[in-house]
Image: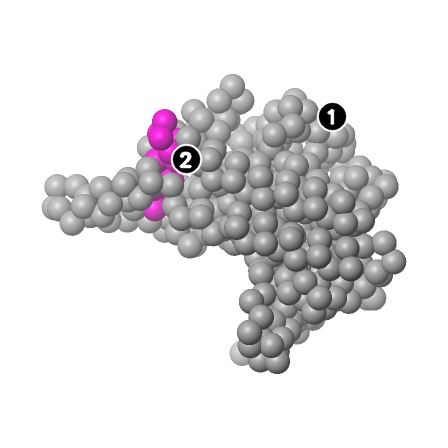
Amino acid sequence: MRINDNFEKLPESYLFSTVARKLREYKEKNPDVEVIRMDIGDVTLPLPAACVAAMHRAVDDMGAGSTFHGYGPEQGYAFLREAIAANDYEGLPVGADEIFVSDGAKSDLGNLGDIYSRDSIVAVTDPGYPVYVDSNVIDGRGGELVDGKWSRFVYLDCTPANGFKPTPPVAHADVIFLCSPANPTGAAFTRGELKAWVDYARDNKALIVFDSAYCAYVTDKDTARSIYEIEGAREVAIEVRSFSKTAGFTGLRCGYTVVPDTLVGYDAEQREVPLRKLWLRRQTTKFNGASYVIQRGAEATYSPEGKEQVKENVGYYLNNAAIIRDTLRKAGFEVYGGVDSPYVWVKYPGAADSWELFDMLLEKAHISCTPGVGFGSLGQGYIRFTGFNTLEKTREAMRRLEDVISK
Ligand SMILES: *Cc1c(COP(=O)(O)O)cnc(C)c1O
């Protein structure tokens, strides 16, 4: 059996393993020091009570003959798809039939490659969420890795000059991955900025894959939560969302993808083919649906109590992010993000290397962060802090940082 050679092209991902190794080594040398993890991309608050109660009821359903559920619909139960359409897309042109429930956004983002051609030119942001790059490389769309960049990708540079929000390139791309509010930079597109992307996609007959895993964190009134707020987006965009960062479902696994009826791709003869049909076929072939219990839990995020509890959790993390922003700014860091996002993206003037900054903060303040270079070459020199730790630990971490800087 010949393997998929693309796996050998893919470099090892050193980011999280190196962070873990450095923390382990530090702990061995300094057993009495408690390091505060400001690098985690996972939530810390427990599930909203409304979700827990709904899942308890769902487990009871599974234990009784009259309410037992076997295989569910591959696309997700109607009760959840209807709740998503009525709540997350209230006032927007998205129907329950266009929503596909899954076991999380990461799976969908990686699996979407099944419906577009191996030859597609893929555009990705630098820095960005690594799944977009790696999954397309595995599918054979990367070309060769030269100086840290894949030869067949179009890179969308995210820098302070553009507020980490790239404008459409001159070059042609077939599939564009956009994340807003973005991981890792926290940058979020306004409606006006997204309109330029929708226009580009129409002109290029391209597909936008819009990752709005952090849409619940949007506070600014000009920031788009959904790409379907933009006129014409139903003809060019797929939107991917998750219950992970909003309702703490990182360990439960539930997300969804919207594929509008009006979205088409093109076959070899340039005939239009509805993408919804392809995605439905892909999901019914390779996926048997998210679990009934988890979907009942996700449904409960739309109950009156559930909504209130989710809002509270998101507010808690945003408050942490605000504390991080303020402290780092006062300490002389260049600070970005953390307003419509749990992530704060920072640079320290004079420090040019992400790992150097990481080591310095670990040694001197006993806090860990995520080196920005792990998200792409333009992340070099930056580090990412998260608002996902507890309020107490966030405060303590910031106190330590202030102490170090004032010395
Ligand atoms: C966390 C995250 C996801 C993954 O969400 P899951 O539903 O847990 O798979 C997707 N996109 C971005 C940008 C993320 O940060």
Is 320 located above or below residue 12 in the figure? above
The percent coordinates of residue 23 (x first, y second) are 61, 71
The percent coordinates of residue 275 (x first, y second) are 55, 38
Q: Which residue is mark 1?
A: 192
Of residues 221 and 243, the one nearer the viewer is 221
Quarter where residue 359 is shown: bottom right
Residue 140 included in the magenta stretch of the image: no
Q: Which mark is residue 324?
A: none
- Local SS, label 1: helix
Q: Which colour style is shown?
A: one colour
N-term mark: 1 or 2 = 1
Quarter where residue 349 is shown: bottom right
Q: Which residue is mark 2?
A: 309
Can residue 223 be seen?
A: yes
- Local SS, label 2: helix
Span of residues in magenta: 294-306
Q: Residue at x 12, y 46 (%)?
A: 65
Of residues 19 and 65, the one nearer the viewer is 19
The percent coordinates of residue 13 (x first, y second) are 65, 68
* Amino acid of disc 1: Gly
Q: Residue furthest front?
A: 407
Image side of residue 320 versus residue 124, left or right:
left
Q: CA distance from mark 1 to mark 2?
A: 31 Å
Q: Quadrant for the C terminus, please.
A: bottom right
The percent coordinates of residue 251 (x first, y second) are 42, 54
Crowd class of label 2 (few under 14; some 14 to 19; many from 20; radius 10 Å): many
Q: Quadrant for the N terminus, please.
A: bottom right
* Amino acid of disc 2: Gln
Can residue 358 be seen?
A: no
